[in-house]
Image (cartoon, rainbow, N blue to C red):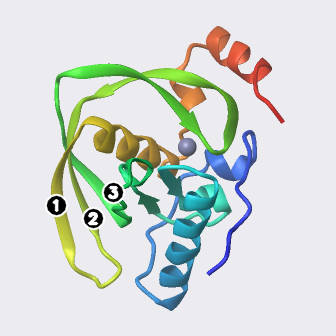
C-alpha cells in the first residue's frame, strides 16, 4: 500500500465527472492506497478523483477517530433516496485546506453500492455517515464544497485557503 498525493483545488481533475470503476485488481489496489492515504491525512473520507483517478469510487470511515475503525470501500454508488429533512454542518475537504464550509444537505440517504468482492449493498445512512457519503459522492460528479456556495462566499473561501 502507499500514501498517494492528494490533489488540491482548483486542480481541473476535481471538477470532472468520473467514469464507472471496474472491479479489477487495479481498483482493489487503488482502494487500499486510498484508505491508507485517508488515514494518513488524516481524514474520514476520500474520493478517487482526489488522487487523480477519475473513477466512481470512494472510501470512508466515519468513526475511526473515535476509536471505532469502520473502513468502507464504496464502488459505483447510487443515492436512491434523500430525506426531505436537511441539516447545515461545517465540512472540510482534504483537497481544500483552510476554513470549513457550512453546507446544507439531507440528513438521511439510502445508498446503494458495490463492494470490492462484487456484492451489492444498500444501506440507510444518517448523521455524519450520510454527510460524509454525500460529500464524497459529490466528488464523483466533479462537485466540491465550494460549488455549494454563492459566488461571493466562494471567492471569500478561496481567499482564505491555506497552502
Ligand atoms: Zn472532499
Mark in the foreground, 3 or 1:
3
Percent position of residue 48, x then y: 55, 62
Residue pointed to by mark 1: 122
Looking at the image, do the residues carrying marks 3 and 1 touch, with CB atoms under 8 Å apart?
no
Q: Residues within 10 Å of mark 2 (few under 14, many from 20)?
A: some
Percent position of residue 36, x then y: 57, 69
Looking at the image, do the residues carrying marks 1 and 2 touch, with CB atoms under 8 Å apart?
no
Mark in the foreground, 3 or 2:
3
Total labels drawn: 3
Residue 6 located left or right of residue 143:
right
Q: Quadrant of the N terminus?
A: bottom right
Does residue 136 sit above or below 104 in this rendering?
A: below
Residue pointed to by mark 2: 113
Q: Name the outermost residue toward the front.
A: 67
* Label placed on residue 28: none
Q: Of label 3 and label 1, which has the lower sequence position?
A: 3
Mark 1 residue element: strand
Residue 10 located left or right of residue 153:
right
Q: Quadrant of the C terminus?
A: top right
**Residue in the picture at 52% in, 56% down:** 47
Q: Of label 1 and label 2, which has the lower sequence position?
A: 2
Residue pointed to by mark 3: 68
Q: Residues within 10 Å of mark 1 (few under 14, many from 20)?
A: some
Q: CA distance from mark 1 to mark 2?
A: 7 Å
Percent position of residue 151, x then y: 64, 14
Q: Nearer the viewer, residue 81 or 16?
A: 81
Residue 2 located left or right of residue 134:
right
Does residue 90 sit above or below 31 in this rendering?
A: above
Amino acid at each position: 500500500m502507499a500514501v498517494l498525493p492528494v490533489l488540491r483545488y482548483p486542480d481541473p481533475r476535481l471538477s470532472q465527472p468520473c467514469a464507472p470503476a471496474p472491479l479489477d485488481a487495479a481498483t482493489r489496489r487503488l482502494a487500499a492506497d486510498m484508505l491508507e492515504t485517508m488515514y494518513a491525512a488524516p481524514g474520514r473520507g476520500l474520493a478517487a478523483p482526489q488522487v487523480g483517478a477519475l473513477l466512481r469510487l470512494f472510501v470512508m470511515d466515519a468513526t475511526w477517530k473515535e476509536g471505532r475503525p469502520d473502513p468502507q470501500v464504496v464502488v459505483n454508488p447510487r443515492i436512491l433516496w434523500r430525506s426531505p429533512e436537511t441539516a447545515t454542518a461545517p465540512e472540510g475537504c482534504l483537497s481544500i485546506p483552510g476554513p470549513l464550509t457550512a453546507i446544507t444537505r439531507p440528513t438521511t440517504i439510502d445508498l446503494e453500492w458495490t463492494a470490492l468482492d462484487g456484492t451489492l449493498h444498500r444501506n440507510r445512512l444518517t448523521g455524519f455517515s450520510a454527510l460524509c457519503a454525500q460529500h464524497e459522492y459529490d466528488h464523483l460528479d466533479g462537485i466540491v464544497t465550494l460549488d455549494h456556495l454563492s459566488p461571493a462566499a466562494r471567492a471569500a473561501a478561496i481567499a482564505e485557503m491555506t497552502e
